[in-house]
Image (tube, grey):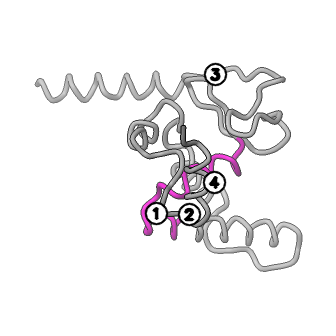
Amino acid sequence: DDHRRALSAFKEDLKKAEERCIVVAADQCCEICGADAMTERFYAFTCTHCCHEACLRALILPTLSEKCREHLFKLEEARLQHQAAAAGAAAKPGSPLAEVEDELDGILAEDCPFCGQLMIDTIMKPFIDPNEAGEAEEIESWAI
């Protein structure tokens, strides 16, 4: 009986989450590049942070596992195939575009990169990687 109540409560919470919406201002800027968010495809998070898809991709790509990164590349390739098919330049790919887009959204917008798990996971990561080529000079320039 407790399991049924818990399941019912979970379903109700899920329904409320699906009905939740946010309002994006017309002058909303991408939190990463600062450009107008509405000029290209963007993601708006419930915390009100907003990011262009390309900016978000560049930010989270280095944090993805190799397997997840490869899957992302395959999904992006499938989306390009859909775009080519829509333009009449290629045959329609196997997976429906909506499925491809949903999976891409699941990877790119799983959580807000500024106040979600990604920020927690990378909080101790230095801004400048001393092992990267050319970064040693940058580190020296900050010496007091």
Q: Which mark is residue 58?
A: 4
Q: Residue at x 43, y 68 (%)?
A: 67
74 to 127, vertically: above or below: below
- Is 32 displayed left or right of 69 in the figure? right
Q: Which residue is mark 2?
A: 72
Q: Mark 3 vs mark 1: which is more N-terminal?
A: 3
Residues at marks 3 and 4 touching, judged by CB atoms closer than 8 Å: no
Identify residue type, mark 4.
Ala
Disc 4: CA contacts within 10 A as few (<14), some (14-19) or many (>=20): few
Q: Which residue is mark 1?
A: 68
72 to 125, vertically: above or below: below
| Magenta stretch encompasses residue 65 | yes
Q: Which residue is mark 3?
A: 22
Disc 1: CA contacts within 10 A as few (<14), some (14-19) or many (>=20): few
Badge nearest the viewer, 3 or 2: 2
SS state under label 3 = loop
Badge nearest the viewer, 1 or 4: 4
- Is 67 displayed left or right of 33 in the figure? left
Give the magenta part as a residue range: 52-71
